[in-house]
Image (cartoon, rainbow, N blue to C red):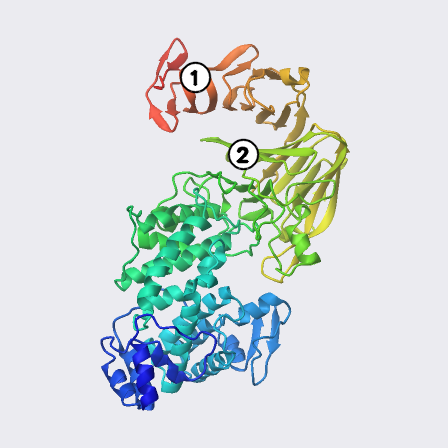
Amino acid sequence: MLSRIIIQVACLLWVPLLSLSAQTSSDEVFQHLNLDFPGMEKVKTAYQKDNLPEARSELLKYFQYRTNRKLDGFEFEYDREKADRNVKNIFRIKSSTHDFGDKIDWTLIHEDKEWQFSLNRMNWFSNYVGVYQQTKDEKYVYAWMEQIKSWIQLGNPGYPRTIDTGRRLQNWIISYWMFVQDLKSPSVSPEFHAMILQSIAEQAEFSYQPENWRRYSNWGTFENAGLSLAVILFPEFRQYELWNKEIWFRMRFQLEHSYHEDGMHVEVSPPYHAHELEVWFDFVRLAKKNGIESSLYSQIPLSPIEDSFLQPAKALMNLYKPTGVVPQIGDTDERDERTVLYKWGKFWNWPDMIYVATDGREGNPPVECSAAFPDGGYYVMRSGWGNNGIPYNEELYLLFDCGSNEPWHAHYDMLNLVVTAYGQDLLKDPGRFTYNEGKERDYFKSTAAHNTIVIDEQNQPRRYTPPEAQWHSLSKFDYVVGVQNSHPQVTHRRSVFFAKPDYWIVVDRLLGRGKHRYDQYWHLSDKILGDVSMEPEGKYIAAPNFHLYSLLPDVNMSFEEGWLSYNYRHRVSAPVIRCSTRGEPPITWATVLYPFRIEAPMFNVERLPVQSESEKRGSSCGTAVRISSIDRTDLFFEQEISGHRCGVEDFETDARMAFVRFDGNRDITEYQMVEGSCLKYRGRKIASLLGSNVDISVQNNRVDVEGECIVSFQLMVQNTPEVFLDGQRIEVERKDGTISFSRIEEN
């Protein structure tokens, strides 16, 4: 009795020194509990009488019938066949199955390390809950208890890694809530209940220790996934107040350091982007439901927590392809994470997020179709959101990746492209396949496995360089120029022009010194395997739903076999187009990516000569492409820099980029300029602007203008158009066939 009194006195200390290295007797649970917590009077009385069986029994009753906490919003699997295998200790994880027989060896490394890590997270507990809800078969609860008891015998709350502790504790707490409190399974014994509650406390305390929090990666969030739920559901634990203060601080820290200011995730992988937000969103949602407020103190007012979620959520929303999945950039499987968008949209009343999550069935479409994320280095070109007569899933989409290849989850993929159109993936990113270092991972990370250019058959050097790109977007076009300069002798500049809503022109410009080999790769979807052909003269690739034109003299085009991985440890073969050349810079390489719904359009694509002032000074030359059909002709031309005069056929401009469209009668129907002041056709001014860095888009009865210090502007059009200046509609008048307006900038 004296020893029991000593233990009781120690339990009343405010901050106890808890043993984290051993998980032995279930009676130690009482050292973790505040027995003075309202409702636990019978537990305390039995414990003080040294009647441990009665104390454990009263403890189970308390947690079964308490009403001071609420938990909802989690979805549970229902796969009875899988649950029956798991009951027998047979687990299929990733792509491999193992039968443990009567006893699970939690230390087994089967297939690869990730298999063991996932085993110790016990994700199948969600399925146990789902199947038990429908069947009320107690064998699933019994298996749940036996597997937990087997793991507790390891005696290590941090096994095998801190991140696995966080994910395991999350699964334990949710399944605990369901089996003990919500469903009140009769199989849960007081002895097991005390044991799991003790282990939950020890794992939460382990996660709370500062040395077990990896602050500057996704680990920091996932290590706290379980601790955050412990704060929500277990105010009875004696460390609760400390945990509560700490978790609010960690949430703000992780949200600030895991995402750039533009909202993109620092580890360049959309699933990690989504899952970090999901962990903290569930915490905020449940804290509000349970009336838990932050006890974090600050000398300056903290912004509303909603603000910490908004930019990352909108960035993720814009990444979604029209097919409903995220692009497989970096270490990414093909996943549909839109359920998280829907939850966020409903919780914070964000109708655009609800719209994207439901393919346009609910909510309101986002205001902007295309989006730029300069901090993360991602640029998304989109034809629409399914609200202009085109089905949502058939909109055109291109992702341009100009980000860093330095974070661990990044690949050697700078200036990579991903393209989807008319419900089909056209250009794919290979995915991750494995985290095991070796030839397999090397391939999926390699520059050659992405839609970019390989120099001298070597990967891009891995180093952190802030994204270097310029973005221009108006109503009828998107245009971006990115730079990859990690090679010691060659700088690769890639520009992408989107002639909305039809097709893309990609210009690769290689600058530097020395003779090198250049291989340009285009990775196609495995869904079109066997249906790809090379047209005569090797300049034109025909595939279902799109054509690819490579416009470079002396280029060698060939087909190769590549790999795509949609899920971890799964891969499929897919066709790859390889375009190769050798030479000394400067080399300018134009490619036209032209998607179509069913029937291939009949047109001719050709490269045109450019007369440019820059060529006279020895700078890199301009690029011009003509795409012509019976009823339409498009002319695109681009310079290395703006401000120089260049001429293409009957046109002259000082713009960095210009695009003109003619109808079948050779009448101009639309044009665009980037960083220009003048566009002439056959000596006649089509547009004349005064200012610097001016962009213009003219089509039908609409004119969009963006630029700095526009003093005056003249435009030759047939009718008085709607004019939008820096996104704001302004009133204009026509006089003598010329429309003029001005804006004076104040210093």
Image height of 137 relative to 589, above or below: below
In the picture, measured across the screen, residue 714 lies left or right of residue 665, that is: left
Farthest-out residue, top: 736
121 up-or-down from 605: above or below: below
Figure quadrant of the N terminus: bottom left
Identify the element where label 1 is drawn: loop
Q: Is residue 213 left or right of residue 510?
A: left
Q: Using the rendered view, name the quadrant where residue 746 is placed.
A: top left
The x, y position of residue 179, in whole percent, is: 37, 78
CA distance separating discs 1 and 2 = 36 Å
Count residues near mark 2 (Cα–Cα under 10 Å), then give few for <14, some for 14-19, many for 20+.
many
- Left or right position of 343 against 554: left
Identified at 70% across, 34% down, the residue is 489
Q: Do we see residue 377 in this rendering?
A: yes
| SS for callout 2 | strand
Amino acid of disc 2? Ala
In the rendered image, the quadrant that contains the C terminus is top left
Q: Residue 358: where, in percent of width, then height?
A: 40, 53
Q: To which residue does mark 2 refer?
A: 469
Name which of mark 1 and mark 2 comes first in the sequence.
2
Q: Is residue 232 above or below residue 737?
A: below
Location of mark 1 (residue): 718
Res. 640 image quadrant: top right
- Taking the spot 38% from the left edge, 39% from the top edge, the residue there is 367
- Residue 601 in picture, x, y percent from top left: 61, 36
Label 1 is placed on what type of residue?
A: Gln
Residue closer to the observer: 596 or 419:
419
- Left/right placement of residue 536 relative to residue 743 reads right
Q: Is residue 336 visible?
A: no
- Identify the residue at horizontal 55%, vertical 42% (top origin): 403
Crowding around mark 1 (Cα neighbors within 10 Å: few <14, some 14 to 19, many 20+) is few
